[in-house]
Amino acid sequence: MSLLRLNNVTKRFGGLTAVNGLSFDLAEGEIVGLLGPNGSGKTTALNMISGYLPLSDGSIGLVDETISGLPPEHIAHRGVARTFQLVRALPSLSVGENVLAALAFRKAPLWGAGAKAEIDTLLADVGLGGRADQPADSLTYIDLKRMELARALASDPRLLLLDEWLAGLNPTELQAGIELISALRQRGITILLVEHVMDAVRALCTRCIVMNTGSKIADGPTAEVLADAEVIRAYLGA
Ligand code: ADP
Protein backbone atom coordinates (compact mmCIF):
# COMPACT_ATOMS: atom_id res chain seq x y z
CA MET A 1 0.00 0.00 0.00
CA SER A 2 1.27 3.50 -0.75
CA LEU A 3 1.82 6.01 2.03
CA LEU A 4 0.79 9.04 -0.03
CA ARG A 5 -1.37 9.09 -3.14
CA LEU A 6 -2.06 12.14 -5.30
CA ASN A 7 -4.88 11.57 -7.72
CA ASN A 8 -5.39 14.18 -10.48
CA VAL A 9 -4.49 17.01 -8.09
CA THR A 10 -5.17 20.39 -9.66
CA LYS A 11 -4.83 23.95 -8.38
CA ARG A 12 -6.13 26.96 -10.26
CA PHE A 13 -5.44 30.54 -9.22
CA GLY A 14 -8.00 32.45 -11.30
CA GLY A 15 -7.04 31.76 -14.90
CA LEU A 16 -3.67 30.21 -14.03
CA THR A 17 -3.43 26.44 -13.56
CA ALA A 18 -0.47 26.15 -11.15
CA VAL A 19 -0.79 22.36 -10.74
CA ASN A 20 -2.49 20.42 -13.49
CA GLY A 21 -3.76 16.86 -12.92
CA LEU A 22 -0.80 15.74 -10.81
CA SER A 23 -0.85 12.05 -9.86
CA PHE A 24 1.80 10.01 -8.08
CA ASP A 25 2.22 7.57 -5.21
CA LEU A 26 4.93 7.51 -2.56
CA ALA A 27 5.78 4.16 -0.98
CA GLU A 28 6.69 4.04 2.71
CA GLY A 29 10.41 4.73 3.24
CA GLU A 30 11.06 6.29 -0.17
CA ILE A 31 13.00 9.51 -0.60
CA VAL A 32 11.78 11.25 -3.71
CA GLY A 33 12.88 14.48 -5.36
CA LEU A 34 10.21 16.85 -6.67
CA LEU A 35 12.00 18.90 -9.31
CA GLY A 36 11.24 21.50 -11.93
CA PRO A 37 11.93 25.08 -12.96
CA ASN A 38 10.73 28.01 -10.87
CA GLY A 39 6.99 28.45 -11.17
CA SER A 40 6.35 24.83 -12.18
CA GLY A 41 4.03 24.19 -9.22
CA LYS A 42 6.24 22.35 -6.70
CA THR A 43 5.54 24.54 -3.66
CA THR A 44 1.85 24.68 -4.56
CA ALA A 45 1.84 20.85 -4.56
CA LEU A 46 3.49 20.76 -1.11
CA ASN A 47 0.97 23.33 0.13
CA MET A 48 -1.91 21.12 -1.00
CA ILE A 49 -0.42 17.95 0.51
CA SER A 50 0.05 19.69 3.87
CA GLY A 51 -3.39 21.32 3.76
CA TYR A 52 -2.32 24.96 3.46
CA LEU A 53 -4.11 25.31 0.12
CA PRO A 54 -7.42 23.72 -0.91
CA LEU A 55 -7.46 21.67 -4.11
CA SER A 56 -9.38 22.86 -7.17
CA ASP A 57 -9.78 19.25 -8.27
CA GLY A 58 -8.56 15.74 -7.47
CA SER A 59 -7.78 14.12 -4.12
CA ILE A 60 -4.91 13.26 -1.81
CA GLY A 61 -4.82 10.11 0.29
CA LEU A 62 -2.58 9.12 3.19
CA VAL A 63 -2.54 5.34 3.64
CA ASP A 64 -6.26 4.51 3.46
CA GLU A 65 -7.71 7.92 4.30
CA THR A 66 -8.49 10.97 2.17
CA ILE A 67 -6.65 13.95 3.67
CA SER A 68 -7.46 16.63 1.07
CA GLY A 69 -10.05 18.94 2.60
CA LEU A 70 -8.72 18.50 6.14
CA PRO A 71 -7.18 21.52 7.92
CA PRO A 72 -3.35 21.58 8.15
CA GLU A 73 -3.25 20.65 11.84
CA HIS A 74 -5.33 17.52 11.23
CA ILE A 75 -3.02 16.51 8.40
CA ALA A 76 -0.04 17.14 10.70
CA HIS A 77 -1.65 14.91 13.35
CA ARG A 78 -1.88 12.13 10.78
CA GLY A 79 1.88 12.26 10.32
CA VAL A 80 2.69 14.82 7.62
CA ALA A 81 5.31 17.45 8.51
CA ARG A 82 7.01 20.10 6.43
CA THR A 83 9.68 22.72 6.42
CA PHE A 84 9.18 26.08 4.75
CA GLN A 85 11.40 27.78 2.19
CA LEU A 86 11.78 30.73 4.53
CA VAL A 87 12.64 29.48 7.99
CA ARG A 88 9.85 30.31 10.41
CA ALA A 89 11.67 30.69 13.71
CA LEU A 90 10.32 32.54 16.71
CA PRO A 91 13.44 34.69 17.15
CA SER A 92 12.68 36.04 20.62
CA LEU A 93 12.53 32.52 22.07
CA SER A 94 15.26 30.02 22.83
CA VAL A 95 16.03 27.09 20.52
CA GLY A 96 14.34 24.72 23.00
CA GLU A 97 11.23 26.91 23.24
CA ASN A 98 10.95 26.95 19.46
CA VAL A 99 10.91 23.15 19.45
CA LEU A 100 8.49 23.11 22.41
CA ALA A 101 6.09 25.29 20.39
CA ALA A 102 6.14 22.66 17.65
CA LEU A 103 5.74 19.81 20.19
CA ALA A 104 2.63 21.52 21.51
CA PHE A 105 0.86 20.76 18.20
CA ARG A 106 0.99 17.07 19.01
CA LYS A 107 -2.17 15.20 19.82
CA ALA A 108 -0.84 14.30 23.25
CA PRO A 109 1.27 17.25 24.45
CA LEU A 110 4.25 16.56 26.65
CA TRP A 111 4.92 18.59 29.75
CA GLY A 112 7.77 19.20 32.19
CA ALA A 113 10.65 16.77 32.26
CA GLY A 114 9.17 14.65 29.46
CA ALA A 115 9.10 17.64 27.16
CA LYS A 116 12.64 18.64 28.08
CA ALA A 117 13.98 15.16 27.34
CA GLU A 118 12.09 15.09 24.06
CA ILE A 119 13.45 18.50 23.06
CA ASP A 120 17.01 17.42 23.90
CA THR A 121 16.59 14.27 21.76
CA LEU A 122 15.12 16.22 18.82
CA LEU A 123 17.94 18.76 18.98
CA ALA A 124 20.61 16.05 19.24
CA ASP A 125 19.07 14.32 16.20
CA VAL A 126 19.62 17.42 14.05
CA GLY A 127 23.09 18.24 15.38
CA LEU A 128 22.02 20.89 17.90
CA GLY A 129 22.60 18.82 21.04
CA GLY A 130 23.01 20.92 24.19
CA ARG A 131 21.87 24.13 22.47
CA ALA A 132 18.31 24.30 23.89
CA ASP A 133 18.92 27.42 25.98
CA GLN A 134 20.58 29.44 23.24
CA PRO A 135 18.48 32.32 21.81
CA ALA A 136 17.11 31.38 18.37
CA ASP A 137 18.17 34.72 16.91
CA SER A 138 21.83 33.88 17.62
CA LEU A 139 21.83 30.80 15.38
CA THR A 140 23.72 30.67 12.10
CA TYR A 141 21.76 29.97 8.91
CA ILE A 142 22.49 26.23 8.88
CA ASP A 143 21.65 25.94 12.57
CA LEU A 144 18.35 27.76 11.98
CA LYS A 145 17.64 25.19 9.30
CA ARG A 146 18.52 22.41 11.74
CA MET A 147 16.10 23.91 14.26
CA GLU A 148 13.41 24.12 11.56
CA LEU A 149 13.96 20.42 10.94
CA ALA A 150 13.73 19.61 14.67
CA ARG A 151 10.40 21.47 14.71
CA ALA A 152 9.14 19.40 11.78
CA LEU A 153 10.32 16.19 13.48
CA ALA A 154 8.56 17.13 16.73
CA SER A 155 5.31 15.71 15.39
CA ASP A 156 7.02 12.32 14.81
CA PRO A 157 6.10 12.36 11.11
CA ARG A 158 5.72 9.45 8.71
CA LEU A 159 6.03 11.82 5.75
CA LEU A 160 8.37 14.79 5.70
CA LEU A 161 8.05 17.49 3.03
CA LEU A 162 11.26 19.47 2.61
CA ASP A 163 11.01 22.71 0.62
CA GLU A 164 14.53 23.63 -0.54
CA TRP A 165 15.90 22.79 2.88
CA LEU A 166 19.43 22.53 1.48
CA ALA A 167 19.37 25.82 -0.46
CA GLY A 168 21.96 28.42 0.43
CA LEU A 169 24.36 26.13 2.30
CA ASN A 170 28.11 26.17 1.67
CA PRO A 171 29.74 22.89 0.50
CA THR A 172 30.66 21.72 4.02
CA GLU A 173 27.19 22.53 5.37
CA LEU A 174 25.60 20.88 2.35
CA GLN A 175 27.46 17.65 3.07
CA ALA A 176 26.30 17.78 6.71
CA GLY A 177 22.75 18.46 5.53
CA ILE A 178 22.81 15.51 3.15
CA GLU A 179 24.03 13.23 5.95
CA LEU A 180 21.29 14.49 8.23
CA ILE A 181 18.55 13.75 5.69
CA SER A 182 20.08 10.31 5.00
CA ALA A 183 19.91 9.56 8.72
CA LEU A 184 16.19 10.44 8.75
CA ARG A 185 15.63 8.02 5.94
CA GLN A 186 17.38 5.29 7.91
CA ARG A 187 14.71 5.88 10.56
CA GLY A 188 12.05 5.01 8.01
CA ILE A 189 10.66 8.50 7.45
CA THR A 190 9.35 8.94 3.91
CA ILE A 191 10.65 12.16 2.39
CA LEU A 192 9.46 14.32 -0.52
CA LEU A 193 12.19 16.81 -1.30
CA VAL A 194 11.75 19.95 -3.41
CA GLU A 195 15.34 20.79 -4.29
CA HIS A 196 17.46 22.54 -6.90
CA VAL A 197 20.84 21.38 -5.54
CA MET A 198 21.42 18.54 -7.97
CA ASP A 199 24.36 17.01 -6.05
CA ALA A 200 21.99 16.56 -3.12
CA VAL A 201 19.25 15.13 -5.33
CA ARG A 202 21.71 12.60 -6.78
CA ALA A 203 23.04 11.67 -3.33
CA LEU A 204 19.67 11.34 -1.62
CA CYS A 205 16.86 10.52 -4.01
CA THR A 206 16.23 7.05 -5.40
CA ARG A 207 13.42 8.46 -7.51
CA CYS A 208 12.55 11.85 -8.99
CA ILE A 209 9.36 13.45 -10.22
CA VAL A 210 9.77 16.44 -12.54
CA MET A 211 7.14 19.13 -13.09
CA ASN A 212 6.94 21.75 -15.81
CA THR A 213 4.20 24.41 -16.05
CA GLY A 214 2.06 22.53 -13.52
CA SER A 215 2.25 19.10 -15.13
CA LYS A 216 4.35 16.03 -14.37
CA ILE A 217 6.80 15.41 -17.22
CA ALA A 218 8.90 12.59 -15.71
CA ASP A 219 8.79 10.11 -12.83
CA GLY A 220 11.30 7.34 -12.29
CA PRO A 221 14.75 6.32 -11.01
CA THR A 222 16.92 9.43 -10.49
CA ALA A 223 19.63 8.59 -13.05
CA GLU A 224 17.06 7.88 -15.75
CA VAL A 225 15.00 10.99 -15.04
CA LEU A 226 18.05 13.27 -15.04
CA ALA A 227 19.12 11.86 -18.41
CA ASP A 228 15.66 12.30 -19.95
CA ALA A 229 15.67 14.62 -22.98
CA GLU A 230 12.48 16.47 -21.99
CA VAL A 231 13.76 17.01 -18.42
CA ILE A 232 17.04 18.37 -19.75
CA ARG A 233 15.20 20.70 -22.12
CA ALA A 234 12.66 21.95 -19.56
CA TYR A 235 14.75 22.09 -16.41
CA LEU A 236 18.39 21.10 -16.41
CA GLY A 237 19.37 23.04 -19.53
CA ALA A 238 21.31 21.66 -22.44
P1 ADP B 1 7.53 26.42 -7.80
O1 ADP B 1 7.45 26.03 -6.35
O2 ADP B 1 7.74 25.27 -8.71
O3 ADP B 1 8.53 27.53 -8.03
P2 ADP B 1 4.92 27.56 -7.33
O4 ADP B 1 4.10 26.42 -6.86
O5 ADP B 1 5.45 28.50 -6.30
O6 ADP B 1 6.11 27.02 -8.23
O7 ADP B 1 4.08 28.43 -8.39
C1 ADP B 1 3.41 27.84 -9.49
C2 ADP B 1 2.65 28.94 -10.21
O8 ADP B 1 1.54 29.35 -9.41
C3 ADP B 1 3.46 30.19 -10.49
O9 ADP B 1 3.06 30.69 -11.75
C4 ADP B 1 3.06 31.12 -9.37
O10 ADP B 1 3.21 32.47 -9.76
C5 ADP B 1 1.62 30.75 -9.14
N1 ADP B 1 1.16 30.95 -7.76
C6 ADP B 1 1.68 30.36 -6.66
N2 ADP B 1 1.00 30.72 -5.56
C7 ADP B 1 0.03 31.59 -5.98
C8 ADP B 1 -1.01 32.33 -5.32
N3 ADP B 1 -1.18 32.23 -3.99
N4 ADP B 1 -1.81 33.10 -6.07
C9 ADP B 1 -1.66 33.18 -7.42
N5 ADP B 1 -0.70 32.51 -8.11
C10 ADP B 1 0.14 31.73 -7.40
Image (cartoon, rainbow, N blue to C red):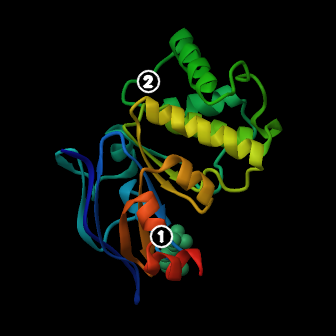
Residue 171 lies, with reference to residue 47, above or below; the image says above
Q: Which mark is residue 206?
A: none
Secondary structure type for disc 2: loop
Residue at left 34%, top 46%?
A: 75
Which residue: 32% across, 68% down?
55
Q: Is mark 2 within 8 Å of ligand 1?
A: no
Residue lying farthest bottom?
Answer: 15
Verify CB contact (< 8 Å) between mark 2 and mark 1: no
Quarter of the image for the N terminus: give it. top left
Q: Position of residue 162 (x, y in %)?
A: 52, 50
Q: CA distance from mark 2 to mark 1?
A: 47 Å
Image quadrant in which you'd find residue 48 = bottom left
| Residue in the foreground of this view, choosing between 231 and 173 | 231
- At mark 1, the secondary structure is loop
Number of marks present in the image shown: 2
Taking the view exactly as shown, the residue that stands out farthest to the top is 113
Which residue corresponds to the image point at 80% horizontal and 41% vertical from the top-left? Answer: 140
Q: Earlier in the sequence, mark 2 or mark 1?
A: 2
Residue at horizontal 55 percent and vertical 39 percent from the top: 181
- Mark in the foreground, 2 or 1: 1
Q: Nearer the viewer, residue 226 or 175?
A: 226
Q: Find disc 2 in the rendering and name its residue.
A: 109
Residue 39 visible? The answer is no
Residue with the mark numbered 1: 227
| Residue 143 x, y percent position in the rendering | 73, 38
Q: Is residue 143 above or below residue 121?
A: below
Would residue 164 be seen by someone viewing this image from the given angle?
yes
Amino acid residing under circle 2: Pro
Task: Locate the C terminus and report the quarter of the image it occupies.
Answer: bottom right
Q: Which quarter of the picture shows residue 107?
A: top left
Amino acid marked by disc 1: Ala
